Image (cartoon, grey):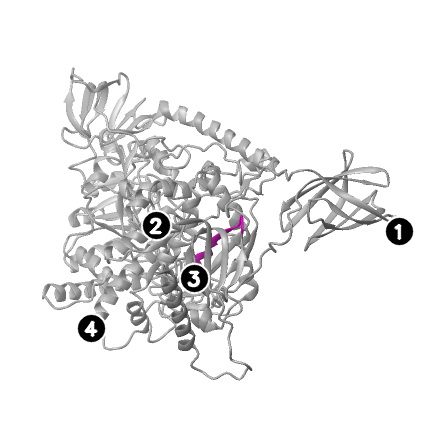
Amino acid sequence: MKMKLVALAFFLGGAFLMAQDYFPKNDGVKTKNNNYTAFTNAKIYVTPTQIIQNGTLLIQDGKVVQVGKSVSIPKNAIVEDLQGNYIYPSFIDAFSDYGVAKPKKADGGGRSAQYDPSREGFYWNDHIMPENNAISGFSYDSKKAEELRKAGFGVVNSHIQDGIARGTGVLVALNDKASESQRILSDKSAQYFSFDKSITSRQSYPTSIMGATALMRQLYYDLDWYNKGNVETTDRSLEALEGNKGLSQIFAAGGNGNILRADKIGDLFGIQYTILAGGDEYERVADVKATNARLIVPLNFPDAYDVSNPYEAQYVALKDMRHWNLAPSNPKVLEDNGIQFSFTLHELKSPSDLSSKLMKAITYGLSKTKALEALTTVPASILGKSSDIGSLQPGSQANFLIASGDIFEKETTLYENWVQGVKNVIQSKDQKDIRGEYTVSINGQNYTASITGEANKPKVELKKGTEKVDAKLEYSTDWLNLSFSENGTESYRFAGKVSSDSQNIGGKIVLPNGTETTVTLTQSGPFKETSKSSSTQKPQLMAVTYPNVSYGYKTKPQQENILFKNATVWTGNAILENTDVLIKNGKIDKVGKDLRAGGAKTVDATGKHLTSGIIDEHTHIAALSINEAGHNSSAEVRMKDAIDPKDLDIYRNLAGGVTTVQLLHGSANPIGGRSAILRLKWGENADGLVFPDSPKFIKFALGENVKQSNWNSYSRFPQTRMGVEQVYTDYFQRAKEYDAKKKSGQPVRYDEEMEVLSEILNSERFISCHSYVQSEINMMMKVAEKFGFRMNTFTHILEGYKLADKMAEHGVGGSTFSDWWAYKFEVNDAIPYNAAIMASQGVTVAINSDDAEMSRRLNQEAGKTVKYGGMSEIEAWKTVTLNPAKLLHLDDRVGSIEEGKDADLVLWNAHPLSIYAKAEKTLIEGTVYFDIEKDQAIRESVQQERNQLINMMLNEKENGGKTQTPVQNKKERFECETL
């Protein structure tokens, strides 16, 4: 049977050659050497789990013919005995830019942004380029290929790392001696996407993560419309997108939040992306696992921060210190959770860094089997090339490594990296490893030499007694040259050869006076690693918290049944003294006196005040971006695509008694993005923060911002307040026609923007409108009435007092500031009595923050309405509770303390409108998300953890580990005026 296999291999090999050799050659003799090469007596990793002891690998014509313990070796085979050595499949990188021309950044183009595309015959957005093929700009780079081979790679999958839809990759074997046609394994290996714009275009849209997400959704909707034959012209981008759909779809996402964003796009359109990860998946591993995506994981573990300067140490956030501590454990966490992943060199400074990063991950618990899978079989599977690369199965390419031992051990030397059957010597197998401790006597003086470093690149530390001597070592082909000097003047030069039967090195030395003498470096001890860097030492791992930042919880808070006894209860319509409130299963069960706990936890609230949770109708906390400024309408974008569940402002707001907020788009354009109503459930992921089944909202804006008064940009319409009105009229007319066509049953290109505006026309979505000036507020109401809907809320509305009667007649609410004015021209007429005057005319009035700092003290802002306008305490309190609940159409669930409503409550230690009041407990649906006593314990824990991590980093530096300099980072805070 074995002989039949060999004969078949001969036949297939010959057939392969005949099939390829169809063109004439003029370079001399055509006869080729078709000999077999057999590697015997090696430990062979056919796959990470199929291991053969004392096996034989037989190759011919760049392919594996046979592998096993009993391989019939043809007579004409070249046999190489690898006794004691290991053979592994060469590594594969599925996410590279090797050999691909770097995109050139577009010219600045002056002060005005570019809003229209620069191409014809392609998709309307320049950042969508699926028609790009990496092969078109590919150029084989021998020098870079050598670097990659030294790191163990035989194949890389390269693509143009630019744009949102990036086009296809090229799969390349790192074979210097092959022709281009031989080394290119696939000229369309995968299709790539990302959330990042192209640097080659100045087209403005998208300017945010939510815009990039919306653009990807619309791209697929447009592809469906195009494929149905509804477009008369040819779109080369959509043609390419459709043509590439059979390839592996790889999305360069990044951190765990972006993994979830990318996966949602894929789920919407039935696409399972392979996703480039960010190395922080350990934080939300259950969520990442739920995507069912295969990951491409970078090993860019951060260096420790140099915290030796206590002032600079203050710049380092706890989350960054914790990531340094936990990042090396990320591969193990992925393995433990059954998530399939490959490794990439992406974001490593050099391919040579791979080895130390891998060993560090293994030290932190990653199994060597999974490490090898992540470098071989998994990337091969991702690329659909498992039969060709990634293993040493018969028929696969002869891409393999020959090493002195376990490839994941520091002492191991990588000798050769064979690519497509071509040998590439990394380190000669014949050269001896001279690392160790030596003694030598020169001119009656005794010296000790400690030779360490890498086997193929050793270094020396020479001492005379205890005194260190400056020395330089060179070693090649068993010849050693050692030069050193004493006192900077007396120079010695030694040259010697390692003897064949021992590690002793005999040779001649030239003394400072020019005479020669014979000496021997005698080995006195084995090689000892002197450096103890973090790559081989595992520090204590910090606990992952929810979220994994300062003040995160070690376990997620749980819902409780609680009885508050003897509180002053602010129901929303009355203030009840010495009253009990019982909450069960997240709801307000009973309000009254002398209630029984019935197994519920009892909280003595004597002398304290219990209110419903504060609701902020207008905030920009918990967001990664606020404005999608690329168009004058961005109704297609969603704030829920930009939620940042790790924003510490969530916790700060809870400490201020805030339980619900409306996360609004900014005011960069007349028609902004869709809102996200959030419950501040600290510790939940982005989806867990979204208020379930909440009404639909969108942000509109008027005034200086939308006409770009302060942008120094004159290329985007509108530039005047008159133009703003025309934008609304035009878009609503288009939406009206779109909706009518859709309702008629005619085929309609699905347009997310028009879908959203149609919802407004059909009273299915409400508008919160940024506003200041009386004339524009009046204009906006007239536009709404013209198209048959009403405005829901004018936010800011600092001139609301001028037309409060008209607002009441229209039925629109006002969400305003308590006492902001004169911070720009259009608010010069603002007065602090605005809220009270609007309320007196029957307008539902709320006080909002629009500011991450002010949002945590909205109780005090509400108190100002008592001073400015004489509002009663109950009516003042409504401006931050029941009234914003009404404006958000959530007053049947939150905003007041009534039986049956959600238990979103705050226990205050004093009168809630007082500047001295502190929230002691903040609850959402019966779960305590802030407790002032636990907060103190958390503060102490945070300081202890910081000190512990600082000591770890100091030890890292002392033991020779790499460090980075701390940089002061200021968190960007968003408000409507932040453009």
Label 1 SS: loop
| Mark 3: amino acid | Val
| Residue 613 on image: x %, y % | 26, 32
Helix, strand or loop at label 2? It is helix
Residue name at image x 34 percent, y 50 percent? 259
Q: Which residue is mark 4?
A: 230
Residue 701 disc label? none
Q: Is residue 971 left or right of residue 654?
A: right
Q: Earlier in the sequence, mark 3 or mark 2?
A: 3
Task: Decide whether the magenta segment is chiefly helix, strand or loop.
Answer: strand
Can residue 824 be seen at all in this image of the molecule?
no
Q: In this orientation, which residue lies closer to the viewer: 467 or 686? A: 467
State the CA–CA distance, disc 2 to disc 1: 68 Å
Pointer 2 or 1: first along the chain? 2
Determine which residue is flagged by label 3. Answer: 64
Q: Indicate whether 926 appears above or below 293.
A: above
